[in-house]
């Protein structure tokens, strides 16, 4: 038994700091590459900076969206919550926003008497935080574009106030799936 122990001790390689560091560097590079790939092609990660989507999504919530939802699964649908890039003012840089899809390509969207109408039909919006107190608006959504509004309409700087209220489909990055901070949960 003693001979076996001595043989095992002889077979063990001495600690090599350079080799150990190299192994850790490989692991870190692989993890960074995987994270980059996931964040670029599979998911979109975003922090909600304002209360425009309350109470569906609260200020400061961190959310994850699927970049593949519309690449593999069809077009955005009314009611989807999406992450998109949009220029909210003349000469402003594009900003990443989170809003709900309201108007689809080719539809007429109207807000009158604090109610939402799509192609003349009154819409039920159970996700609204409170009754809307809004001016009247008329939108004719162009083909290939969508109209986005916040769930907290009375406090949302959404399409009603943008110089160009329409979001081209190519600017929609992901369909929001769930929140992971400060609490975990699916978003509907």
Image (tube, helix red, strand yellow):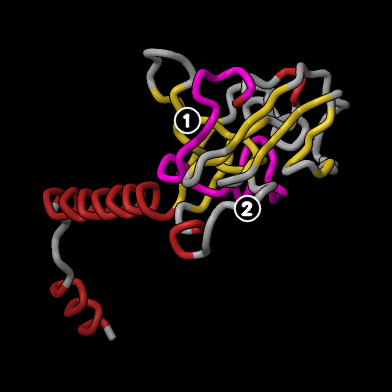
Question: For the point 78% across and 41% down, which residue is it?
Answer: 120
Count of numbered tags = 2
Q: Where does residue 160 sit, x and y in percent of width and height?
A: 64, 22
Q: Where does residue 45 sit, x and y in percent of width and height?
A: 49, 41
Q: Where does residue 40 sit, x and y in percent of width and height?
A: 35, 48
**Does label 2 or label 1 sit earlier along the sequence?**
2
* Residue 79 lies within the magenta run: no
- Taking depth in this image into account, of 110 and 38 the one nearest to the observer is 110
Question: For the point 24% across and 50% down, which residue is it?
Answer: 29
* Label 2 Cα neighbours within 10 Å, binned few <14 / some 14-19 / many ≥20: some
- Taking depth in this image into account, of 141 and 172 the one nearest to the observer is 141
Quarter where residue 12 is shown: bottom left
* Residue 179 lies within the magenta run: yes
Q: Is residue 162 left or right of residue 80?
A: left
Q: Tell me if residue 89 comes above or below residue 143 in the rendering.
A: above
> Which residue is tagged 1?
96
Point out the stretch of residues depicted in magenta. Answer: 160-188
Q: CA separation, marks 2 and 1?
A: 19 Å
> Which residue is tagged 2?
77
Circle 1: element type: strand
Question: For the point 14% across and 66% down, which residue is it?
Answer: 13
- Taking depth in this image into account, of 95 and 162 the one nearest to the observer is 162
Q: Where does residue 32 sit, x and y in percent of width and height?
A: 30, 47
């Amino acid at each position: 038994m003693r001979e076996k122990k001595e043989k095992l001790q002889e077979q063990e390689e001495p600690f090599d700091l350079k080799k150990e560091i190299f192994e850790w560097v490989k692991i870190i590079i692989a993890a960074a590459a995987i994270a980059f790939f996931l964040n670029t092609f599979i998911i979109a990660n975003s922090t909600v900076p304002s209360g425009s989507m309350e109470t569906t999504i609260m200020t400061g919530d961190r959310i994850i969206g699927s970049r593949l939802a519309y690449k593999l699964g069809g077009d955005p649908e009314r009611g989807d919550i999406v992450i998109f890039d949009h220029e909210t003012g003349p000469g402003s840089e594009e900003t990443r926003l989170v809003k709900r899809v309201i108007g689809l390509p080719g539809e007429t969207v109207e807000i009158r008497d604090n109610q939402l109408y799509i192609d003349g039909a009154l819409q039920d919006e159970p996700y609204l935080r409170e009754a809307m107190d809004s001016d009247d608006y008329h939108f004719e959504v162009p083909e290939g574009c969508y109209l986005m509004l916040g769930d907290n309409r009375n406090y949302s700087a959404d399409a009603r106030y943008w110089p160009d209220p329409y979001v081209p489909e190519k600017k929609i990055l992901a369909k929001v799936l769930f929140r992971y901070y400060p609490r975990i949960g699916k978003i509907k």
